[in-house]
Amino acid sequence: MKFVIQRVKEASVSVENNIIGKIDHGFMVLLGISNTDTEEIADKMVNKLVNLRIFEDENEKTNLSLKDVNGGLLIISQFTLYADCRKGNRPSFINAGKPDEANRLYEYVISKCREEIPVVAHGEFGAHMEVSLINHGPFTIVLDSAEIIK
């Protein structure tokens, strides 16, 4: 499982020119699910996400979490995070999760985030989406379960 986390001032996602998810300050998260991911992995990744301290405190140190600043989450499914570009110029997506299981885990991640964070918006799995955001910093973090969970 991979999360590309961007600290944002605001973010939204649209499908067919209709905004379906929007947050003010918080994290916009691109979520990639592999064919080996499980709920156990998702639980560990969500715990890391909601407790990640990348908001500045009164001393301008990144000591505050999403919960501390009452931030929101915008979660967007992104199978292309599992693109394999080692051969040729056309990526392979063989390591991306199969759609039914990936969608189930995507919905699971959203539900687990809602247990911790009051404002959780999301995109539409498998849809063509347009994402808008104002990255605050810029500040972008990549969490990869292969590196975090041993």
Image (cartoon, helix red, strand yellow):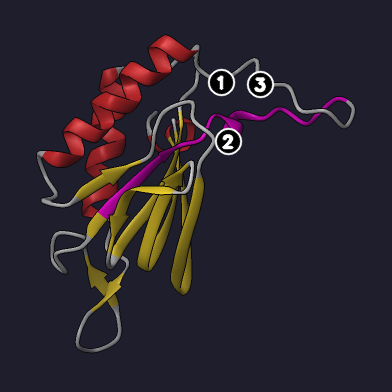
Upstream in sequence: badge 2 or badge 3? 2
- Residue 51 vertical placement versus 143 (above, below): below
Q: Amino acid at mark 2?
A: Leu
What residue is rendered at 22% in x and 50% in y? Answer: 50
Q: Quadrant of residue 37?
A: top left
What residue is rendered at 11% in x and 45% in y? Answer: 116
- Residue 124 vertical placement versus 14 (above, below): above
Using the image as rendered, state which of residue 89 and residue 14 is in the foreground. Answer: 14
Residue lying at the far right of the rendered structure: 88
Q: Position of residue 62 (x, y in %)?
A: 30, 74
Q: Position of residue 77 (x, y in %)?
A: 44, 34
Q: Residue 96: which disc?
A: 1
Q: Which residue is mark 2?
A: 81
Q: Residue 93: which disc?
A: 3
What residue is rendered at 71% in x and 27% in y? Answer: 84
SS of the residue under disc 1? loop
**Left or right: 104, with 136 as reference point:** left
Q: Position of residue 132 (x, y in %)?
A: 48, 59
What residue is rendered at 22% in x and 41% in y? Answer: 47
Q: Amino acid at mark 3?
A: Phe
Upstream in sequence: badge 1 or badge 2? 2
Using the image as rendered, state which of residue 72 and residue 2 is in the foreground. Answer: 72
| Segment tinted magenta in the rendering | 73-87
**Left or right: 69, with 27 as reference point:** left
Q: CA distance from mark 1 to mark 2?
A: 8 Å
Q: Position of residue 144 (x, y in %)?
A: 47, 38
Marks 1 and 2: CB-CB under 8 Å? yes
Q: Badge 1 local density, few (<14 within 10 Å), some, or many (20+)?
A: many
Residue lying at the far front of the rendered structure: 17
Q: Amino acid at mark 1?
A: Ala
Q: CA distance from mark 1 to mark 3?
A: 5 Å
Marks 1 and 3: CB-CB under 8 Å? yes
